[in-house]
Amino acid sequence: GDSVTQMEGPVTLSEEAFLTINCTYTATGYPSLFWYVQYPGEGLQLLLKATKADDKGSNKGFEATYRKETTSFHLEKGSVQVSDSAVYFCALSGTDSWGKLQFGAGTQVVVTP
Amino acid sequence: EPEVTQTPSHQVTQMGQEVILRCVPISNHLYFYWYRQILGQKVEFLVSFYNNEISEKSEIFDDQFSVERPDGSNFTLKIRSTKLEDSAMYFCASSWGPGSYNEQFFGPGTRLTVL
């Protein structure tokens, strides 16, 4: 079945550092790929998405490119802020699905001043 | 900005008791979902619901679980006889359209503790 694997955390960074969170997936067909973020005490929020190969999703300085050849959707940000401290979830939705999201385990990111 | 709300934020219950978790989706959304996250584990899909019926469910969603949209605003998840392993954070989500192209908006979650 479909699955998502993302790097384990926590990832601790200094402010203005470069952030990468790796995400790879297994799926049949051409799933849509998502990054969700969860700030402390809040629900999951969509950060960005890509619905076909080579699409780049971007939002709030974060980017991720849908790489079909490597089945990856790595999240990157060039200069993180303390406010980016959160848990980040990679997820996919299969083409034969009614919207069911399959999530990775989540990666906690801690940004220190 | 419209948001999904969930009540209660924390529910404590005894094993074998019935619980109902409540959600108010965004008002013009048509598709509704429940997910859960056991502490330290992945967020797992439970069920999707559209046009007053279940459209998809996972293996987790067995006969002990049911969902209902009792009126035009609420969406509920009922667990008939709770088990210790049902302890988790339960998230409700809603979307305007189906499938993988439409953003799902999540509520803040209900933490269920089964003693």
Image: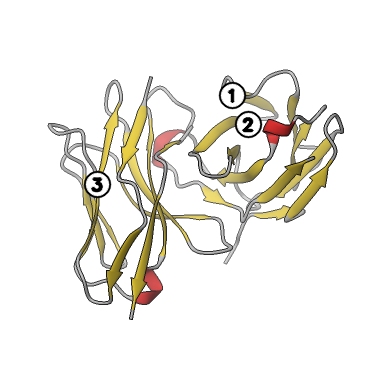
Vertical order, A87 against A102 (above or below): below
Going by the numbered disc 1, the residue's amino acid type is Ser
Residue indicated by mark 1: B55
Labelled disc at residue A22? 3
Q: Quadrant of the C terminus of chain A?
A: bottom left
- Identity of the residue drawn at 63% across and 55% down: B4
Say what secondary structure mark 2 lies in: strand
Please indicate whether residue A4 sits to the left or right of residue B37 in the image.
left
**Chain to which the residue tagged by mark 2 belongs:** B
Please indicate whether residue B82 sits to the left or right of residue A53 in the image.
right
Going by the numbered disc 2, the residue's amino acid type is Phe
- Check disc 2: other Cα within 10 Å, few if <14, some if 14-19, many if 20+: many
- Identity of the residue drawn at 57% across and 61% down: A42
Do the residues at pointers 1 and 3 share their chain? no
- Identity of the residue drawn at 49% across and 35% down: B98
Q: Quadrant of the N terminus of chain A?
A: top left
Please indicate whether residue A33 sits to the left or right of residue A86 in the image.
left
Residue indicated by mark 2: B49
